[in-house]
Amino acid sequence: MLPKSATQSKFVQIGNRILPPAILTLLVMYSLKNTHLTSGQSALPAILALAAVIIVHIIKRNALLSILVGTALYMFLKQIIFHGL
C-alpha cells in the first residue's frame, strides 16, 4: 500500500494544511464582527468561547472539535448564564 502522501496531489496536501486555520480565522472574524469587546458583560460570552476555541485547538489540533466546543460554550453562556444581556 502506498503512503498517504504519495496518493494525494500537491493541491490536496496544501489544502489539508491551510484550510482548517483559514476556516477558523473566518469563523472568528464573522463571530466577532458585531461584538464590542469593550462593552462589558455582553462581550464576555464571545471572549470566553474564543479562549476555549484557542485552548482546545492548541491541545487537540482538531478544527471540528474546536468549532463545536466554542459554539456549544457560546450558546450555553449566552442562553443560560448571560440570558437577557
Image (tube, rainbow, N blue to C red):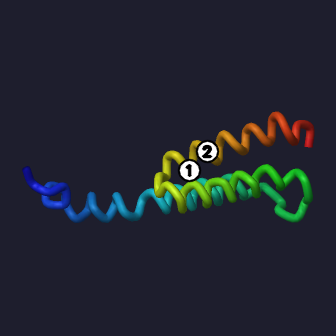
Q: Amino acid at mark 1?
A: Ser
Residue 46 position, x and y percent, is: 75, 53
- Residue at the spot 26% in from the left edge and 62% down from the top edge: 11
Disc 2 packing (10 Å; few <14; some 14–19; many ≥20): some
State the residue in front, 69 or 26: 69
- Residue at the spot 47% in from the left edge and 57% down from the top edge: 61
Examine the rendered structure and indicate whether residue 77 appears above or below residue 10.
Answer: above
Residue 35 position, x and y percent, is: 79, 56
- Residue at the spot 57% in from the left edge and 58% down from the top edge: 26
Residue 21, disc: none
State the residue in front, 37 or 56: 56
Residue 69, disc: 2
- Residue at the spot 72% in from the left edge and 58% down from the top edge: 33
Disc 1 packing (10 Å; few <14; some 14–19; many ≥20): many
Residue 80 position, x and y percent, is: 83, 34
Residue that badge 1 annotates: 66
